[in-house]
């Protein structure tokens, strides 16, 4: 993605709280024999952050390109901010903003000039354009750099300016295609804070990322895309519970209680030094309740209970068969279980 979508008029869509921002059914796209998207369904409530997570080549950018009206799908339907993607493409464009991996700002212009140019493209009145540019420069902490040419900017500053340009048109839905790829950790954190602050204003964010940590930090819900199909969808916690490796860890005050509990939960591993018992579990509420009820019925008191779920790295690896892009797996219990 290289474009920042210019909307002809500021978004005027009115949607009620809790209504879906994006609904997609059966979205498909092929290039020749190559099936890139194979029947994607999405349901994204307004005012939430949704992450489309997948390895390189999974079809993330293609999804964004279709939903932002840049390329047509072969089949399927999509509603964005209540407008049909195909029949009301103009209204869809007016409601959305798109920022890509590669900042679409003009290097020869200053940050302020870039923003004013965008305001012009959107036909904002001159005074309104100036006000909006100043407000966005302030919000993104670019006021000091406002009069400098973008060619002197760091990667993080360009990315912020790119997002600021998208916001000139006050979009209700923002597509962020790999918004932090190539940024250093500090700039990445700044972008995350900005993205969070956008949602506080009721904007819906559709984010694509290869970074599990990014999806985990930001997204209300995550869909995992692999070879054009959604292989999982849910909150980070729900996804982590999908795969084995989780357990409930109980700690006891003395070895007697530990041994009674170990006898009660036949298959559990225990550590007699740390006085802990590990019960394989998805960590869900029914599983927790069963463990607590079991302890109660046997009148065994536990000192502490913790739930360990696998992290998104494990989920990604299990679902896509791809090696983790980064980070260490925590699939195996770190405790000295035996
Ligand atoms: P991602 O963003 O997840 O890395 P893309 O959506 O960019 O994946 O690409 C998905 C697949 O579609 C890739 O195999 C890519 O080579 C292919 N593809 C994307 N655009 C085109 C195109 N214009 N022509 C042919 N193949 C394409």
Image (cartoon, rainbow, N blue to C red):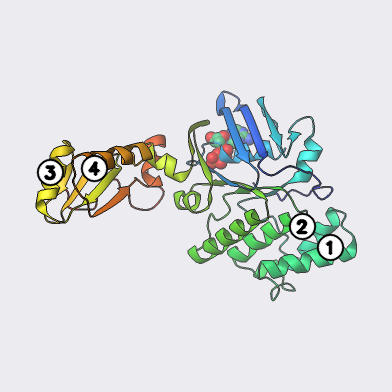
* Residue nearest the viewer, comparing 100 with 254: 254
Q: Tell us which disc is closer to us: 2 or 4.
A: 4
Q: Residue at x 28, y 45 (%)?
A: 248
What is the spatial separation of the Cα atoms under label 1 and label 4, in whole angstroms? 66 Å
Q: Tell us which disc is closer to us: 1 or 3.
A: 3
What is the spatial separation of the Cα atoms under label 2 and label 1, in whole angstroms? 8 Å
Q: Secondary structure at mark 3?
A: helix
Q: Residues within 10 Å of mark 1 (few under 14, many from 20)?
A: many
Marks 2/4 in contact by CB < 8 Å: the verdict is no
Up/down of 33 relative to 324, above or below: above
Q: In the rendering, at what x and y percent does residue 113 appear? A: 79, 66
Q: Residue at x 66, y 66 (%)?
A: 140
Q: Tell us which disc is closer to us: 3 or 2.
A: 3
What is the spatial separation of the Cα atoms under label 4 and label 3, in whole angstroms? 12 Å
Q: How many marks?
A: 4
Residue 260 is tagged as 3
Question: Mark 1 sits on what residue?
Answer: 129
Marks 2/1 in contact by CB < 8 Å: the verdict is yes
* Residue nearest the viewer, comparing 330 with 55: 330
Q: In the rendering, at what x and y percent does residue 232 appear? A: 47, 34
Q: Earlier in the sequence, mark 3 or mark 2?
A: 2
Q: Residue at x 85, y 58 (%)?
A: 120
Q: Secondary structure at mark 4?
A: helix
Question: Mark 2 sits on what residue?
Answer: 168
Q: In the rendering, at what x and y percent does residue 74 appear? A: 66, 25
Marks 1/4 in contact by CB < 8 Å: the verdict is no
Question: Mark 4 sits on what residue?
Answer: 296
């Amino acid at each position: 993605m290289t474009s920042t979508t210019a909307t002809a008029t500021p978004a005027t869509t009115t949607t009620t709280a809790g209504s879906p921002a994006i609904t997609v059914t059966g979205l498909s796209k092929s290039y020749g024999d190559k099936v890139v998207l194979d029947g994607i369904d999405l349901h994204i409530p307004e005012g939430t952050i949704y992450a489309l997570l997948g390895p390189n080549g999974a079809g993330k950018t293609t999804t964004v390109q279709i939903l932002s009206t840049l390329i047509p799908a072969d089949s399927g339907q999509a509603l964005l901010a209540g407008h049909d993607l195909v029949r009301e493409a103009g209204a869809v464009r007016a409601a959305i903003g798109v920022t890509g991996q590669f900042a679409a700002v003009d290097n020869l212009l200053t940050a302020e000039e870039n923003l004013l140019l965008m305001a012009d493209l959107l036909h904002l009145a001159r005074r309104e354009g100036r006000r909006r540019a100043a407000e966005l420069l302030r919000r993104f902490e670019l006021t000091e750099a406002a009069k400098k040419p973008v060619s002197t900017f760091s990667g993080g500053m360009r990315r912020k300016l790119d997002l600021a340009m998208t916001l000139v048109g006050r979009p209700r839905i923002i597509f962020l295609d790999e918004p932090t790829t190539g940024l250093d950790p500090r700039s990445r954190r700044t972008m995350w804070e900005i993205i969070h602050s956008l949602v506080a204003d009721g904007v819906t964010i559709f984010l694509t990322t290869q970074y599990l940590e990014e999806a985990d930090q930001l997204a209300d819900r995550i869909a995992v895309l692999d070879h054009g199909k959604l292989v999982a969808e849910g909150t980070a916690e729900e996804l982590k519970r999908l795969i084995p490796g989780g357990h409930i860890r109980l700690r006891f005050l003395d070895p007697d209680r530990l041994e009674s509990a170990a006898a009660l939960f036949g298959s559990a591993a225990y550590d007699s030094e740390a006085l802990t018992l590990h019960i394989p579990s998805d960590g869900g509420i029914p599983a927790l309740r069963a463990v607590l009820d079991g302890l109660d019925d046997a009148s065994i008191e536990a000192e502490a209970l913790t739930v360990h779920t696998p992290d998104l790295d494990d989920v990604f690896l299990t679902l896509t068969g791809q090696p983790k892009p980064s980070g260490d797996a925590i699939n195996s219990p770190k405790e000295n279980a035996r």
